[in-house]
Image (cartoon, helix red, strand yellow):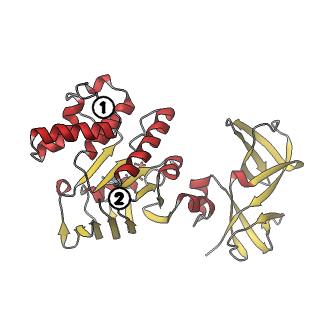
Amino acid sequence: MAQIEFQDVSLAYGGGGGVTGVDLTVEDGEFVALLGPSGSGKTTLLRLVGGFLRPDRGAVLIGGEPVAGPKAWVPPEKRRLGMVFQYHAVWPHRSVASNVEYPLRLAKVGRSEREERVREALSLVGLEGFEHRAPETLSGGQRQRVALARALVMQPAALLLDEPFASLDAALRARLRAELSALVRRTGVTVVHVTHDRTEALALADRVAVLHEGRLVQVDEPRRLYSAPATPFVARFVSDAALLRVRARGAGRFALEGGNEFEVENIPEHGGSGPGTLAVRPQDIRLEPGGEGRVRAVLFMGDTQEVVVGWRGHELRVQAPADARYRLGEAVRPVFGRGVFFPDG
Ligand SMILES: Nc1ncnc2c1ncn2[C@@H]1O[C@H](COP(=O)(O)OP(=O)(O)OP(=O)(O)O)[C@@H](O)[C@H]1O
């Protein structure tokens, strides 16, 4: 088990892109999700830990030892990491046991110990009795569990996961998520998990590191990320907040560009006055009958429904109770229960 540390890490690809000035410490035994849209640099950070890329600047440390930096380089196979990727996770021509056993063979572990450790690893991922099965006879989820067993069999210092469930259907993904959560808690292994799926990041991680255009914009516990976003980008990406350009007038009053005033009942960590961006989450807006808003779409979600409302030139997503009835084009008045204000500059 080990801590993973990025110290002011930068890497620029030739054609633009990469990561800039990343400082992040993943504590021993901690589960950190790297979350961000496509192209934000998540995989780049993971590959820097894995040793498949070298930073242009800064250092990467595993267990307090520099593995990449101005004076250090430890090759991937010496970093004691387990990895699981989205695709090509399992070799098709080898049995389940032989897949899991492979890293032990490379490390020249003796036969009886190999057998014992393969059995342990398969039991850890709930695949006892699958030793002799061929990968093509397994479901997608079972295959990913074989990959996980192979990553765990070397008792790695840390586990690196790159969208490991992305190719699976939603129900299976949810089940494997729960299994992964239980498994990492049981083994106490440090995990860095790359995902663009915020539900997955919020559900699994102790802390979530949000990336935007190659920079870390917020590293926080899921609850805090959700309730106290550091930037408008985080508010929109993590909690689907509407972003409104406003001028704060004080005491919860805001004016939209064009002058229309409205009120927000609760502004936590009230951020001053003047121009800025107001972020309002779907669950913090209520709809009352009549008013300037118009219902544009209603999406039934099971326990709730999402009502899309056009209001003063903006589009608001509103999480409404499932039993409320809305008609397309109906006039509604949005009431803002809570918002986070980000002053300009
Ligand atoms: N080998 C490469 N050569 C040049 N540019 C690259 C290379 N790999 C990634 N990039 C660029 O660097 C940026 C970050 O890529 P990265 O793969 O880290 O993003 P990501 O957040 O993992 O995205 P995704 O979710 O789509 O996998 C992107 O703009 C990408 O186009």
Q: Residue 25's spot in the image, x, y percent? A: 38, 67
Q: Secondary structure at mark 2?
A: helix
Quadrant hosting residue 324: top right
Would residue 175 be seen by someone viewing this image from the given angle?
yes
Give yes or no for contact between labels 2 and 1 (Cβ–Cβ under 8 Å).
no
Quadrant hosting residue 146: top left
Q: Residue 125's spot in the image, x, y percent? A: 34, 38
Q: Which mark is nearer the camera, 2 or 1?
A: 1
Whole-Å distance between the Cαs marked 2 and 1?
A: 34 Å
Confirm or reject: label 2 Cβ below 8 Å from ligand 1.
yes
In the image, is residue 126 above or below residue 207?
above
In the image, is residue 253 above or below residue 244?
below
Residue beneath label 2, please?
A: 45
Q: Residue 230's spot in the image, x, y percent? A: 57, 67
Residue beneath label 1, please?
A: 128
Residue at image position (79%, 68%) is 254
Q: Residues within 10 Å of mark 1 (few under 14, many from 20)?
A: few
Q: Nearer the viewer, residue 266 or 252?
A: 266
* Left or right of 65 on screen, residue 245: right
Q: Quadrant of the C terminus?
A: bottom right
Tell me the kind of residue under disc 1: Glu
Residue at image position (9%, 42%) is 110
